[in-house]
Image: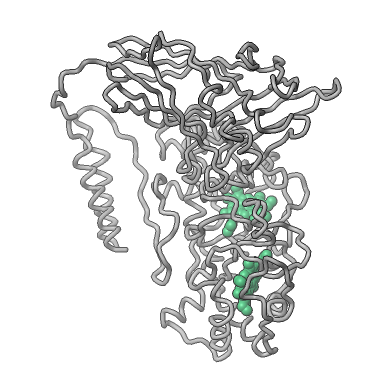
């Protein structure tokens, strides 16, 4: 006990003495400069992304035929990294983004200060890593005021889809809160998007490279039944996995082909 | 002790003045305090990582714990259901009432030694002390508020704005800062000065009845109610029912092996916290011991340690109760550090 206290005391003094040390001014290697990358997310529905998905507008599920109107659609994109042609990564700090269909500003992510280079891949995660689910109170997009946290069963709601569907001409409510970060209930999914062919991601000095992506959540209901059969999920478990991961990887989080489609890089 | 304090002070003063030359004024910095681990306790689970413990933070947490501003209609505070005189359990009622004047589902547990706890609530659904308050704050049967509204209310209070600014240097109170300081108060609630602790450290002798009770306890109870914290934090079905009313741990894991399992409660300060069990079904310790002795009901998930009745004699039951009373820490229930602060 005593040694701890003394260490703290000593540390405080050192802090006190060093608090004003001048900033390190050694010049770094010749600076090729930095640029930015923006990622725009355009939400779509339907088999061919032909239906525009927006809050309070009605879409029809191409496989299940359900007529659905979303009042809320929110999910987390996290731990974003860009891979350079030389195989190294630029990693965003504190990389937690809450995408909220009702907030246009959340649909465009901007990454600043990437070293000038040619990038071949964006790596990202759908959901919130297990560490942040067990490390107490967080801030920013992970703040509890964003209503994406389960209090009674600690953990992030990684995707929230709420709204109404038509059942015999009547409006009924649906509410899907998907999460689960550990063991058999884990739905956190690491994904990549490659840039090649006509879609080369070149970050040049002082410029912003703009990536456009269409996001199609129809695969939430690829393996899961019609909303007429299952209209509520409020905890991690088998049902949440069916929507996020799906059978044979055909869920919204797991599928790399249809959920997030690269449209252009400019 | 005094010397250390002085050294810290010198450091703090240095911190405050070392930037003067550049014309910047460093804001008043709060004073660090240390978490004291009782000599007979293991290392705590919560280590204040990312939550620098300070006197001001602890005090702020204490104000909040006692402040009904946290409830929807400003009638109820944490302390309404967690009273110091009862070792921070409710006032000897089986179930607590929230803002909706309705009873909750479970008995409000005593609060102490939470820094050692690996999970919170009877079913262990909460995994970190910092996020525990979200349950009572947002439950309609407790404080009935939303986090957004609480943050809004705190930001409208000059009292809290000033105090949070000292700590975090920001003119805006966030939910994170609020939860961190509340955790500073709750995790600093340490109870370690019962007759039992004094006996263990050789300061006093146990009576012969306490000794007999302690021996029985070590043989029959300590595998779940493990010393010195008097819980091993595991989830067990202790045989309360043959038809499950409250699914317990199952609610969190959805695993049928967890049906009817609850977190083993600590037995420290047990004398102050009646009624007992997750639903407050027993009103005194004699009833609990009689149940443990001969009343355990069978169920597929019943803990193997409880399959054969203990069948204690009357004397043994009395000795066990006497031993349990040696776990009362009167210093804890009257410690002014934890009492309602004056404003």
Residue A107 % position (x, y): 52, 18
Residue B178 % position (x, y): 51, 41
| Residue at x-position 40% and y-position 12% | A199
Residue B259 % position (x, y): 68, 59
State whether residue A105 appears in this view.
Answer: no
B9 sits to left or right of B188? left
Residue B48 % position (x, y): 41, 50
Corner quadrant of residue A193: top left
A254 sits to left or right of B74? left
User: In this view of the protein, which residue sits in the foreground, A204 or B286?
Assistant: A204
Corner quadrant of residue A35: top left
State whether residue A124 appears in this view.
Answer: yes
| Residue at x-position 34% and y-position 25% | A83
Quarter of the image where the C terminus of chain A is located: top left
User: In this view of the protein, which residue sits in the foreground, A95 or B322?
Assistant: A95
Residue that lies at the very extreme toward the left in this rendered image: A26
A257 sits to left or right of B97? left
């Amino acid at each position: 006990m005593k040694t701890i206290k003394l260490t703290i005391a000593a540390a405080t003094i050192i802090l006190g003495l060093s608090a004003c040390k001048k900033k390190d001014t050694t010049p770094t290697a010749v600076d090729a400069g930095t640029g930015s990358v923006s990622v725009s997310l355009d939400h779509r529905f339907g088999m061919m992304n032909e239906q525009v998905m927006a809050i309070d507008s009605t879409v029809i599920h191409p496989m299940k035929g359900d007529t659905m109107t979303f009042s809320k659609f929110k999910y987390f994109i996290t731990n974003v990294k860009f891979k350079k042609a030389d195989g190294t990564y630029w990693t965003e700090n504190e990389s937690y983004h809450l995408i909220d269909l009702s907030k246009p500003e959340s649909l465009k992510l901007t990454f600043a200060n990437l070293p000038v280079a040619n990038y071949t891949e964006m790596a990202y995660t759908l959901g919130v890593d297990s560490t942040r689910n067990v490390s107490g109170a967080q801030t920013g997009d992970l703040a509890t005021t964003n209503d994406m946290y389960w209090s009674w069963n600690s953990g992030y709601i990684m995707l929230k889809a709420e709204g109404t569907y038509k059942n015999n001409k009547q409006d009924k409510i649906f509410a899907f809160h998907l999460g689960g970060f550990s063991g058999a209930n884990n739905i956190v999914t690491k994904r990549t998007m490659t840039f090649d062919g006509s879609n080369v991601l070149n970050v040049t000095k002082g410029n912003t490279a703009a990536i456009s992506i269409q996001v199609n959540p129809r695969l939430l209901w690829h393996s899961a039944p019609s909303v007429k059969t299952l209209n509520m999920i409020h905890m991690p478990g088998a049902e949440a996995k069916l929507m996020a991961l799906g059978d044979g990887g055909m869920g919204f989080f797991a599928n790399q082909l249809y959920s997030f489609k690269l449209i252009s890089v400019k | 002790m005094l010397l250390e304090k002085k050294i810290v002070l010198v450091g703090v003063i240095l911190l405050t003045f070392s930037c003067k030359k550049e014309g910047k004024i460093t804001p008043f910095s709060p004073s660090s305090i240390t978490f004291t681990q009782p000599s007979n306790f293991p290392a705590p689970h919560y280590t204040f990582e990312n939550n620098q413990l300070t006197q001001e933070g602890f005090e702020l947490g204490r104000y909040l714990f006692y402040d009904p501003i946290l409830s929807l209609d400003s009638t109820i505070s944490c302390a309404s259901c967690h009273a110091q005189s009862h070792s921070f359990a409710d006032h000897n009622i089986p179930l607590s009432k929230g803002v909706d004047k309705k009873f909750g589902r479970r008995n409000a547990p005593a609060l102490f030694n939470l820094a050692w706890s690996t999970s919170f609530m009877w079913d262990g659904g909460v995994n970190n002390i910092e996020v525990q308050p979200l349950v009572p704050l947002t439950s309609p049967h407790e404080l009935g508020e939303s986090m957004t509204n609480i943050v809004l209310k705190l930001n409208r209070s000059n009292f809290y704005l000033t105090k949070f600014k000292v700590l975090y240097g920001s003119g805006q109170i966030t939910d994170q800062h609020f939860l961190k300081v509340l955790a500073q108060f709750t995790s600093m609630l340490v109870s370690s000065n019962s007759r039992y602790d004094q006996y263990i450290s050789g300061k006093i002798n146990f009576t012969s009845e306490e000794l007999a009770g302690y021996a029985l306890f070590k043989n029959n109870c300590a595998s779940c109610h493990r010393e010195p914290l008097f819980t091993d934090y595991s989830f067990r079905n202790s045989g309360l029912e043959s038809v499950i009313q409250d699914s317990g741990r199952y609610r969190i894991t959805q695993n049928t092996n967890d049906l009817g399992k609850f977190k083993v409660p600590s037995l420290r300060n047990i004398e102050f916290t009646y009624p007992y069990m997750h639903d407050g079904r027993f009103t005194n310790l004699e009833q609990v011991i009689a149940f443990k002795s001969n009343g355990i009901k069978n169920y597929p998930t019943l803990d193997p340690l409880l399959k054969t009745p203990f069948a204690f004699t009357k004397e043994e039951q009395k000795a066990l109760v006497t031993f349990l009373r040696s776990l009362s820490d009167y210093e804890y229930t009257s410690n002014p550090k934890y009492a309602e602060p004056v404003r």
